[in-house]
Amino acid sequence: MKTYSQKASEIKREWWIIDAATLPLGKLAVVIADKLMGKSKVTYTPHIDNGDYVVVVNAKNIKVTGNKMVDKKYYRHSGFPGGLTELKLEEVIEKNPALAISEAVKGMLPKNKLAADRLARLRIFDTAEHAHAAQNPKEIK
């Protein structure tokens, strides 16, 4: 028996939609990363990017457990001395809720050449309205 290896010409991408208010942030990121990588497909091949598109709605309503709203911090550095900026999760959700979800998903994806293309197929919207109704996305339960 031969091992099946998918070719780039055989890729069939689907569209999925998930409500961010239904799951905690970490579990939501796991489900999204699984769809972006295509690991739930029978034709999964590690070196081919055969993942699907994922639309996330209600990003403003993400849930976390425990004290993560206050304790979880996001860091960035300007490159200059003393240029470290620290934001709490609640501040990030106020300013840009898509950042919290995309950073969580980015942490779940493998760190390789395919990661940027996979993350580019993630579309995040703050409210329930989204611009991808024409693609007829299937709902992730």
Image (tube, helix red, strand yellow):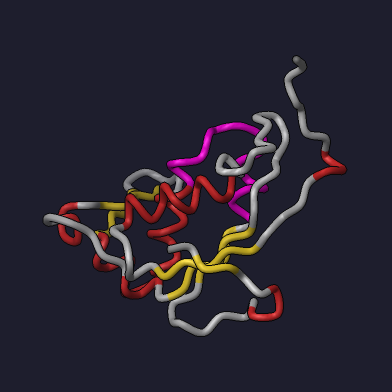
Kindly give the residue lying farthest to the left in the view shown. 67
| The residue stretch that appears in magenta | 106-120
Provide residue 57's location: percent of width, then percent of height. 46, 73
29 or 67, which is in the foreground? Answer: 29
Kindly indicate the quadrant of the structure image that contains residue 40.
top right
Q: Relative to residue 12, is residue 17 drawn left or right?
A: left
- Which residue is at a point 51% across and 40% down the rendered structure image? 109
Q: Relative to residue 52, is residue 62 drawn left or right?
A: left
Q: In which quarter of the image is the C terminus?
A: bottom left
> Is residue 96 visible in this depiction of the protein?
no
Q: Total label count?
A: 0
Q: In which quarter of the image is the N terminus?
A: top right
- Which residue is at a point 65% across and 30% down the rendered structure image? 46
Provide residue 33's location: percent of width, then percent of height. 50, 47
**Residue 122, magenta (yes or no):** no
Provide residue 36's location: percent of width, then percent of height. 58, 49
- Which residue is at a point 40% across and 71% down the rendered structure image? 59
Q: Relative to residue 137, is residue 9 drawn left or right?
A: right
Kindly give the residue lying farthest to the right in the view shown. 9
Provide residue 44's location: percent of width, then percent of height. 65, 36
Q: Relative to residue 15, is residue 97 drawn left or right?
A: left
Kindly give the residue lying farthest to the bottom in the view shown. 129
> Is residue 55 visible in this depiction of the protein?
yes
